């Protein structure tokens, strides 16, 4: 399997996700600068977290128009797997690869802590390493992670099984106090219709080693590599 990690000015999780992927693949992924219009032939493209372009205008709004993103949009339409984490999720929504938008946190402050995460679907190349209903502990680190879409879009996501993860309490129940940013219906991650694109706000790449306090991110990377190898 081959993977690529796209790097923007302001990215700060590209090395984290590259190490998490490399540990499972057995070799390092390609690192692609955002101005590169050509991306190597790969099975997976990751748009990592950070603050692309300093989050000017809106988070991810400028990055969504970079040369690399134009190529990523074409690859995604052709069925190549694309994963967007945190700022990467914001970029994918701005580019139109995923529905909805990410607004400022309801608490109006930056949130950085481990949160409960409920796996809503195990039927994807990204989540096949989990069981539906499984509860995870994964860190978040964002100021604009409040997922929003109109009711018709949210209903469609529910009906088509496009909700990947929701914020939850430790026992898996959905509760307002367990939602760190005010996201609609506690949504933490969504798929596109064909489920070859996933965006999520939590950082699974920062939950792969015991020293990080959780290894609940490991199955996501192992599952992706197994599905795409």
Image (cartoon, helix red, strand yellow):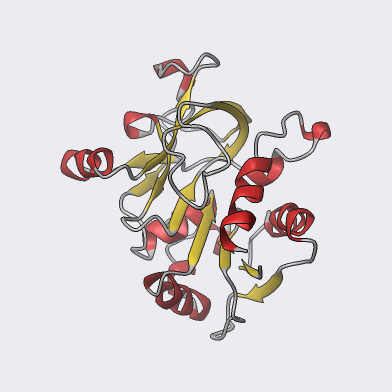
Residue nearest the observer in this picture, 131 or 173: 131
Indicate the quadrant containing the N terminus: top left, top right, bottom left or bottom right.
Answer: bottom right
- Residue projecting furthest to the bottom: 38
Q: Nearer the viewer, residue 48 or 74?
A: 74
Which residue appears at 52% of the width and 56% of the height?
Answer: 84
On screen, residue 157 versus residue 221, left or right, reads left
Q: How many marks?
A: 0
- Give percent across and percent down for residue 11: 64, 60
Indicate whether 164 appears above or below 222: above
Q: Quadrant of the C terminus?
A: bottom right
Viewer-proximal residue among 26 and 107: 26
Residue 219 found in image quarter: top right
Residue 106 vs 81, above or below: the answer is: above
Q: Name the spot of residue 92 as percent of width and height, x first.
A: 43, 60
152 displayed left or right of 74: left
As drawn, 80 above or below 163 = below
Left or right of 193, for residue 136: right
Can residue 57 be seen from the camera position used here? no
The residue shown at (56%, 86%) is 38
Is residue 77 among the parts visible in the rendering?
yes
Q: Residue at x 46, y 51 (%)?
A: 199
């Amino acid at each position: 399997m081959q993977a690529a990690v796209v790097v923007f000015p302001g990215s700060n999780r590209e090395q984290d996700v590259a190490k998490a992927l490399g540990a499972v693949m057995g070799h390092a992924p390609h690192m692609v600068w955002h101005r590169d219009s050509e991306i190597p032939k790969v099975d997976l493209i990751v748009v990592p977290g950070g603050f692309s372009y300093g989050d000017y205008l809106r988070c991810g709004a400028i990055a969504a128009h970079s040369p690399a993103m134009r190529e990523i949009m074409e690859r995604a339409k052709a069925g190549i797997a694309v994963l967007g984490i945190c700022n990467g999720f914001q970029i994918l929504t701005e580019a139109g690869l995923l529905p909805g938008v990410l607004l400022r946190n309801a608490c109006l402050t930056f949130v950085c802590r481990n949160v409960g995460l409920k796996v809503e679907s195990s039927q994807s190349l990204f989540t096949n390493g989990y069981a539906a209903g499984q509860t995870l502990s994964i860190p978040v680190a964002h100021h604009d992670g409040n997922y929003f879409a109109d009711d018709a879009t949210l209903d469609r996501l529910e009906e088509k099984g496009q909700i990947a993860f929701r914020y939850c309490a430790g026992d898996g129940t959905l509760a307002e106090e367990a939602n760190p940013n005010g996201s609609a219906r506690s949504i933490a991650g969504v798929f596109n219709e064909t489920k070859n694109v996933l965006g999520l706000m939590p950082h699974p790449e920062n939950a792969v080693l015991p020293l990080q306090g959780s290894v609940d991110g490991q199955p996501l990377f192992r599952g992706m590599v197994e599905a795409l190898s």
